[in-house]
Image: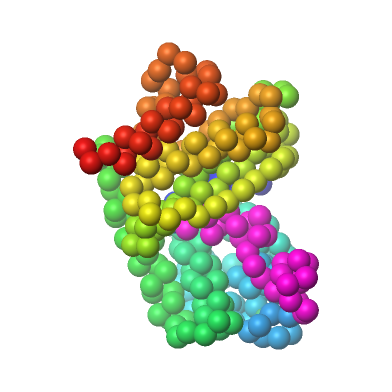
Amino acid sequence: MASPMESKSSPLCPLFLWRACNDILPTKNNLYKRKVVIDQLCPICNSEVESVGHALWRCVSAQAVWCCCEGPIQKSSVAAEEFIDIFDALCDRLEDTELEGFVSIAHKLWTRRNKVVFGGTVLPHTVLIKQALELVEDFRKTHLGTAELGQGELISYGRWHRPALNSIKINWDAALDGRKKLMGVGIIARDCQGEVKAAMCDVIPYIRDPIIAEAIAARFAVLFGRNLGFESIDLEGDAREIILALENTEDADSIHGFQGRCWNLCLLGESPT
Ligand SMILES: [Zn+2]
């Protein structure tokens, strides 16, 4: 099964996708389980339990948007309950750009759902789709174009590799909202069977540089593994510049050395030079 941390999609909204696939978006169902609200009904259709799969795919309001999309997304009929299963099914059917479009539209659907709940202007279906697909196009022009020119490659579509027996693989990823100067970090720890042993996400303010965001996320990953007491950890990130910088030292196998180098990268990035 594809994982949001390792799939061919999506460089766009990785933290949102990670939260959706791990069923930790604050839907009515999840809030009900935590005893925050007293009912599980979808705030839009008021007819079904609002799970992530319902909010982003099965709800009549979501389906109204998906039906307005052109191409294979419009024709995709996925009956799965969980969002991760819906996403997994679409991974097999859609090309990379179409899958990125799906994630971007799903993100817009979640934003629209929050505006319905908390108040705000709700976009018409066609405008929502247009804005979501323009984000994908802009992202590809800016980031993938830059990587092709060799001016910095922060995106990787590499597959997850199993750690050695009795080791824990910790993957990290960072997302940056340059306009709001916010970074998101997502970290997941899995054993050699691929079973999730722990996961976390966080939002950190006042970060503007994608390299610094990835370096901070790498340091978080090290601390996460150490604080959970894993004896043998295998770290894997997708920010090539950070990985190359961290590997280029004599103590590359030392966790403490690795953590120190992550921190040094953060400090270097914060200097005026
Ligand atoms: Zn609904």
Q: Which quadrant of the figure has residue 118?
A: bottom right
State whether residue 246 is above or below residue 212. Answer: above
Q: Is residue 158 shown to the viewer in this render? A: no
Q: Which residues are the magenta region?
A: 13-40
State whether residue 6 is above or below residue 9. Answer: above
Query: Which residue is located at x 63 percent, y 73 percent?
Result: 55
Query: Which residue is located at x 47 percent, y 16 percent?
Result: 251
Q: Which quadrant of the figure has residue 161?
A: top right
Q: Is residue 52 shown to the viewer in this render? A: yes
Q: Residue furthest left?
A: 273
> What percent of the width, then of the height, locates residue 45?
67, 85
> What percent of the width, then of the height, locates residue 152?
30, 39
Give the colouring mode of the picture.
rainbow
Q: Give whichever of 250, 87 is nearer the camera.
A: 250
Query: Which residue is located at x 69 percent, y 29 percent?
Result: 230
Question: Is residue 140 covered in magenta?
Answer: no
> What percent of the width, then of the height, locates residue 66?
54, 74
Q: Is residue 185 left or right of residue 132?
A: right
Q: Which quarter of the image is occupied by the C terminus?
A: top left
Q: Residue furthest top?
A: 250
State whether residue 29 is above or below residue 253. Answer: below
Q: Image quadrant of ligand 1?
A: bottom right
Query: Which residue is located at x 27 percent, y 45 percent?
Result: 146
Question: Is residue 25 covered in magenta?
Answer: yes
Q: Is residue 147 left or right of residue 28?
A: left
> What percent of the width, then of the height, locates residue 205?
43, 55
Total numbered badges shown on the rendered structure:
0
State whether residue 8 is above or below residue 16. Answer: above
Q: Which quadrant of the figure has residue 194?
A: top right
